[in-house]
Amino acid sequence: MTRTIKFGVIGCGLMGREFASTAARWLHLENTKARPEIIAVCDTNTGLMDWFSDNVPSVAQKTTDYKALLANTDVDAIYCALPHVLHDQVYPEILEAGKHLLGEKPFGMDRAANHRIQAALDSHPELFVRCSSEMPFFPGAQKVIDLVRSGGLGDIIEVEAAFLHSSDLNPDKAINWKRMVEVNGAYGCMGDLGMHVLHVPLRLGWKPRHVSAALVNRFRERPDGNGNLVPCDTWDNATITGHVDDAAGGFPLVMKTWRIAPGESNTWSLRVLGTRKSAYFTTKNPRQWQWMSYEGGKQIWQVEDLGFDTLFPTITGNIFEFGFPDALQQMWAAFLDELSGGDANGFHCVTPAEAADHHAILTAAQKAGTEHSVVVVDYRSDT
Ligand SMILES: NC(=O)c1ccc[n+]([C@@H]2O[C@H](COP(=O)([O-])OP(=O)(O)OC[C@H]3O[C@@H](n4cnc5c(N)ncnc54)[C@H](O)[C@@H]3O)[C@@H](O)[C@H]2O)c1
């Protein structure tokens, strides 16, 4: 029988509502071990909570105080989607309250904050905790991952993972918390987008030994929405080049987290180039993936239409297109499956250890980019 996990949502903004939509159409998924039911919501903006009570009939508690939500003994698990500066304050309290957690990335505004979260996790090994990152659940991304796992790539020439936005190309776009160092963190775009580009490389064991980084702050002021221009100190774009060791002498892992990529709208891509096999997927072309096999002779990329070929089976016919809300639902299916004793069908959500490694890489990239140097990544958890 499908178990019901009762959820509290802390942070009812952009991502909080996406989870509500995912939970509301859980009937899309077939044969799941568990289903989410949102029974409590918390946000300091009461209007956002009204959206939940208007649209989610199971919501019984609305509160502006997350401590009141955590005191609700009916709540089994929390989805926490708060600004980065609050992660290391709220995630440990969630664990202290005995709730399982899917926490939004970057899992702490910086490495010190991530360590504070990790310390709380160490005290609660009985709780199930994962970090959000949904883009690798696109079927095309899974095809690239499967190809790498099946081996036979030959020597890897290069891996490039990118997440590209473009709305910051508009200098009149008003500043928000993701463009403020004190709320978003000094990583800037890397903190916001870094987990998206690192989820798959870390899962495949590609941990760069050292990194260099080109960091760009193109617009240093932005309107505040009240007719003033205010400083905008966060990095807009980061191009991080890591060196991953392997038996063939290593390869570059290029990670692009760009907020100013002209024309791009939430484009996530992954390209793996090997001497025998290569593969590529981009959400710009969400139903297709590309690959090439080379055994001498012609070099021909092949393209396959995938449709709804998902990790977790759904009722949707596989001739239809897959999109962002579907990736999010697949990620939630992985979370609930693992929470209920499953193996997430072979591709689980980001673990706290992976989130910690991503902080090690971003901290090194921040140093490399500001000092114009090459920085060795220190993966030890106590630094
Ligand atoms: N997985 C993804 O694709 C993805 C996409 C966007 C954002 N995110 C992450 O989600 C998190 C939230 O981002 P968002 O875009 O939803 O932001 P948002 O600003 O839309 O939502 C954050 C919400 O938190 C509320 N809030 C702030 N302080 C609070 C407090 N003390 N108590 C209760 N509520 C409070 C705000 O009122 C707001 O509604 C961030 O960690 C971000 O990195 C993830």
Image (cartoon, rainbow, N blue to C red):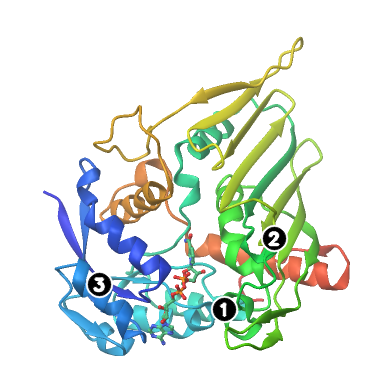
- For the residues marked 3 and 2, what is the alpha-carbon distance in whole angstroms? 33 Å
Quadrant position of the C terminus in the picture? bottom right
**Figure check: 345 above or below 317:** below
Q: Position of residue 235 (x, y in %)?
A: 72, 71
Q: Which mark is residue 48?
A: none
Badge 2: few (under 14), some or many (20 or more) residues near its Cα, within 10 Å?
many
Please state the horizontal and vertical placement of residue 94, each as a whole percent of the image. 35, 79
State how far apart marks 1 and 3 are (Cα). 23 Å
Mark 2 sits on what residue?
A: 260
Q: Is residue 244 left or right of residue 115?
A: right
- Residue 273's image quarter? top right
Circle 3 — which element? helix
Q: Amino acid at mark 1?
A: Asn
User: Label 2 is placed on what type of residue?
Assistant: Ile
Which mark identifies residue 176? 1
**Mark toward the start of the polypeptide (2 vs 1):** 1
Q: Secondary structure at mark 1?
A: loop
Q: Which residue is mark 3?
A: 52
Secondary structure of the residue carrying tag 2 is loop
* Residue at horizontal 16 percent and vertical 56 percent from the top: 3
Dividing the picture into quarters, in which one does residue 371 lie?
Answer: bottom right
